[in-house]
Image: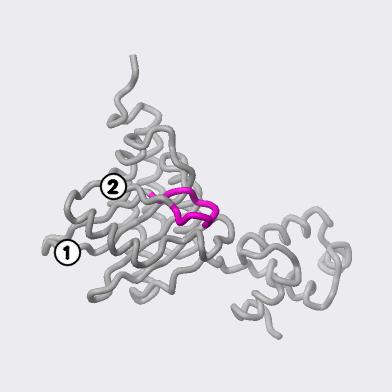
């Protein structure tokens, strides 16, 4: 017998409980990123999460992605505005195909919230491959979005309520990673850094890989440039 899409299995309920429980410990941007790209993925798989928060008559956007996202792959402001108008009429999750030639993700599942005044305080769009069961994804998105909103609002409270412009999250590197990045800036190899810091080459390699991912870059030179731009190392 085929299970109804609009129904949580025992595994789904367990995952949702873990997601809600873990959300209570999220206060910082890097924690939100780890939560969204970790536990939340278990219930609503996605490659990118676009968060929109009302600022006056406009929506200010923020983007969290596991890998660098091409500008052409992001949903355009005008399309999001039209989608929100559609959402206001139905109140149900919408599916937006990605722009042709934009690469991944292939579509966005968008759902918003309606305030007591009838206005939309926030929306969230989950981008990724088109699922085999869109009805099920719509149901899951509808369930998780209120928790995503509460969690993201807590993070914004720590940031003074203003999300940055739409971009991939750049996590803050750890003190050790910043130290290694500084030695990379000096032209040192992983082997050199391992000897200087009395670490194994394998440990240094892992730190470098984590750092590249956090900074959203592909090589050491780009990491140094991004580290200087974000003031995580000095020029």
Q: Position of residue 17 (x, y in %)?
A: 36, 39
**Residue pointed to by mark 2:** 93
Quick check: is 107 in the magenta stretch?
A: yes
Magenta part of the chain: 98-108
Name the residue located 23 percent from the left edge and 74 percent from the top edge. Answer: 57
Does residue 7 appear left or right of residue 225 in this picture?
left
Q: Quick one: 128 or 99, which is closer to the camera?
A: 99
User: What number is the disc on residue 103?
Assistant: none
Q: Quick one: 154 or 2, which is closer to the camera?
A: 2
Residue extending farthest bottom: 235
Name the residue located 67 percent from the left edge and 79 percent from the top edge. Answer: 233
Residue extending farthest front: 100
Quick check: is 114 in the magenta stretch?
A: no
Name the residue located 37 percent from the left edge and 61 percent from the top edge. Answer: 51
Residue extending farthest left: 117
Of labels 1 and 2, earlier in sequence is 2
Q: Position of residue 198 (x, y in %)?
A: 84, 63
How was this image coloured? Answer: one colour
Crowd class of label 1 (few under 14; some 14 to 19; many from 20; radius 10 Å): few
User: What number is the disc on residue 119?
Assistant: 1
Task: Name the secondary structure under disc 2.
Answer: loop
Tell me the quadrant of the picture where the C terminus can be found: bottom right
Q: Position of residue 56 (x, y in %)?
A: 23, 76
């Amino acid at each position: 017998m085929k299970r109804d899409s609009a129904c949580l299995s025992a595994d789904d309920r367990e995952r949702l409980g873990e997601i809600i429980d873990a959300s209570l410990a999220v206060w910082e941007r890097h924690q939100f990123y780890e939560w969204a790209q970790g536990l939340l993925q278990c219930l609503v798989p996605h490659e990118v999460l676009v968060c929109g928060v009302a600022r006056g008559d406009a929506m200010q956007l923020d983007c969290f992605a596991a890998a660098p996202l091409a500008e052409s792959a992001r949903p355009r402001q005008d399309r999001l505005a039209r989608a929100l108008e559609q959402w206001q009429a139905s109140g149900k999750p919408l599916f937006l195909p990605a722009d042709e030639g934009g690469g991944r993700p292939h579509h966005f599942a968008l759902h918003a919230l309606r305030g007591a005044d009838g206005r939309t305080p926030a929306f969230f769009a989950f981008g990724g491959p088109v699922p085999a069961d869109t009805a099920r994804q719509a149901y899951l998105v509808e369930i998780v979005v209120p928790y995503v909103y509460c969690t993201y609002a807590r993070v914004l409270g720590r940031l003074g309520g203003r999300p940055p412009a739409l971009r991939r999250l750049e996590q803050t590197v750890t003190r050790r990673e910043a130290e290694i990045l500084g030695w990379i800036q000096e032209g040192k190899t992983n082997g050199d850094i391992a000897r200087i810091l009395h670490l194994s080459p394998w440990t240094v390699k892992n730190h470098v890989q984590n750092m590249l991912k956090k900074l959203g870059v592909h090589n050491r030179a780009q990491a140094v440039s991004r580290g200087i731009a974000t003031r995580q190392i000095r020029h």
